[in-house]
Amino acid sequence: MNATVKDVMTNRVVSAKKTATYKDLALHMRQYRISAFPVVDESLKVIGVVSESDLLPKEAFGGDPDSAGLITGILRHKDMEKATAVTAYDLMTSPAVTVSPDDSVQHAARLMYDRKVKRLPVVDQAGLLVGIVSRTDILAVFDRPDDEIRREVVNQVILSEFIQDPRQYTVQVKDGIVTLAGAPDTSRQGRDMITRVRHVQGVVAVRDRLSYPADDISMAAGPLFMPRG
């Protein structure tokens, strides 16, 4: 199972037109219990995102940055602009960080982590909004049943990818944690197998209980001393 964004995303998205007012944005955030909107243009292409943090400067400074006194000296220019902004276009963070429906869940998770965002608009090849994926959606892959994870490790990883007899290995999965025991042909094969199992969808961790060939480990590490000649 290689989950993609379209497998976990929400199809029904509350978006905002670029002309939406500050008041409308605040009202709909409360109404729909969400903390951000994708902002779209007339053709429904995503051009930015408005979040609660974009709306906060106005509440903090009452629409007048000068009222902040000495604090204005350390405010960033963008924050000062947003304190006086009244439309989604002026408030939004642009360009939006987006993903496509066919991107992997792992890719989406890395984007969220790197960009410090809680959700990503999902767009098609034309840039049109087709969904949204949140951190909660991403974490849904860890709801995968243990027996389903075990079947993939045995059938797809050990048998199909590494062309090994599954009877050589013991695979146990508990709460998403895979314990893998057995005797791989080489140390490299064992290490690669462990790495591959870590990337199976729904795997929380892998406990390596493989018995690595002693001679192979020595050869892989290389000699401690080289003869001089």
Image: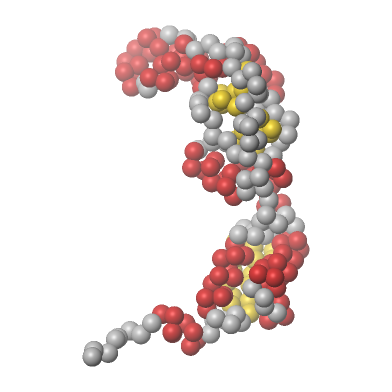
Horizontal and vertical percent position of residue 118: 57, 36
Q: Which residue is at 54% across, 46% downward?
A: 110
Picture quarter with the C terminus: bottom left
Depth order, front residue of 168/72: 168
- Height in image: 215 above or below 42? below
- Height in image: 49 above or below 109? above
Q: Is residue 52 visible?
A: no
Depth order, front residue of 116/46: 46
Q: How is the image coloured?
A: secondary structure
Instruction: Please tell me in which quadrant of the rendered image residue 150 appears.
Output: bottom right
Picture quarter with the N terminus: bottom right
Looking at the image, which residue sits at the far front? Answer: 126
Q: Is residue 220 visible?
A: yes
Q: Which residue is at 65% across, 35% downward?
A: 124
Depth order, front residue of 183/188: 188
- Height in image: 52 above or below 67? below
